[in-house]
Amino acid sequence: MEFQGRACGSATPPSEEEMELRRGPWTADEDLMLMNYVTAHGEGRWNSLARRAGLRRTGKSCRLRWLNYLRPDVRRGNITPEEQLLILELHFRLGNRWSKIARHLPGRTDNEIKNYWRTRVQKQAKQLRCDVNSKQFRDILRSIWMPRLVERIREASSSSAATAMHQNAAAPLAPTRPVHRAAEPPPTMEYSFEARLSSPPASESVTESRGIQGVGVDWMQGAQPPSPGGYAFSGLPDVDQSGWGESLWSVEDIWLQQQQQL
DNA sequence: AAACATGGCAACCGCTATCAG
DNA sequence: TCTGATAGCGGTTGCCATGTT
């Protein structure tokens, strides 16, 4: 990606080089041009849109930029525990169908979910020296990671209930302007996890909807999570101290799991 | 303080599916 | 039916910020 940004809208006629398609990171000017054009004329026909908008980008690049970054409803930044849990459950059922998974997480893009999976989940699998798709790793997810997420969600909901009255309800879920490498705290979840699970997007096919309904809720709704070996929560590291998605188990956890596999 | 290593993620690539002419 | 354009998907790459030595 040895692309070098160049100011758009130069008064001098474009050189041969400038007429070539640009690649690499988008500039603020390009973002503005694309956003203005899509706002005025709508999406679709990305190749011709790119030309008409005066962008020296492929239609593909414009589409990707819009969908993953510029869309007004796109949410970026920290993946909440609810979202993590949903991603894990949906991946169990759908595999690497990132776009399908993304449809169940409003504002999240397939790219972001894919990146989350590769950087966070696969990292844990690597630490455990097992394949991310292996039964062993899945069992670990179910018996350790997911129960902790549920626990975390419950703690958050109970504490947020206590502090709700002090919070300003105006915090937006989706910034009108995208925030690069957002460092803000996770937004308040405005939807019920269970409710979301039981109401998949309208675009989902009937069969898919049936397949998604009830994802993960069988053991979440008040029941004990599957816990081979009688897993206890006490004495475990506080996984919430260093941000969402940090390592959810300690070395002892890994050792414990490996013993159970023997 | 500098060099190096690592992780996160934006963007690209190649491929397939879909649709219109 | 065929063909080209477009949309969409999943995998991969490489830059950059951050952490570590």
Image: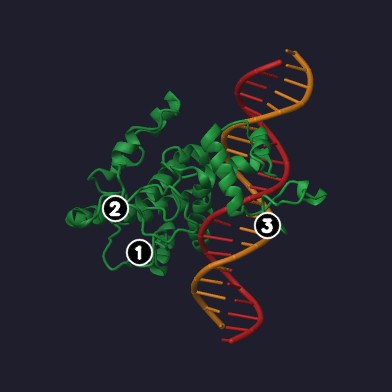
Chain colours: A green, B red, C orange
Q: Nearer the viewer, residue A126 or A51?
A: A51
Evaluate if marks 3 and 2 touch, with contact meaning CB atoms under 8 Å apart.
no
Name the residue: 45% across, 51% down.
Answer: A76
Location of mark 3 (residue): A5
Q: Which amino acid lies under the numbered mark 1 shown in the image of this protein? A: Val
The amino acid beneath tag 2 is Ile
Q: Is residue A122 left or right of residue A4?
A: left
Q: Position of residue A92 (x, y in %)?
A: 45, 42
Q: Which mark is residue A239?
A: 1
Residue for badge 2: A153
Chain identity of mark 3: A
**Could one spot residue A228 in this view of the protein?**
no
In the rendered view, tell whether residue A22 sits above or below residue A201: below
Give the chain of mark 1: A
Where residue A261 sits: x, y (%)?
43, 57
Depth order, front residue of A193/B20: B20
Same-chain status of marks 3 and 2: yes
For mark 2, name the chain.
Answer: A
The mark nearer the N terminus, 1 or 2, is: 2
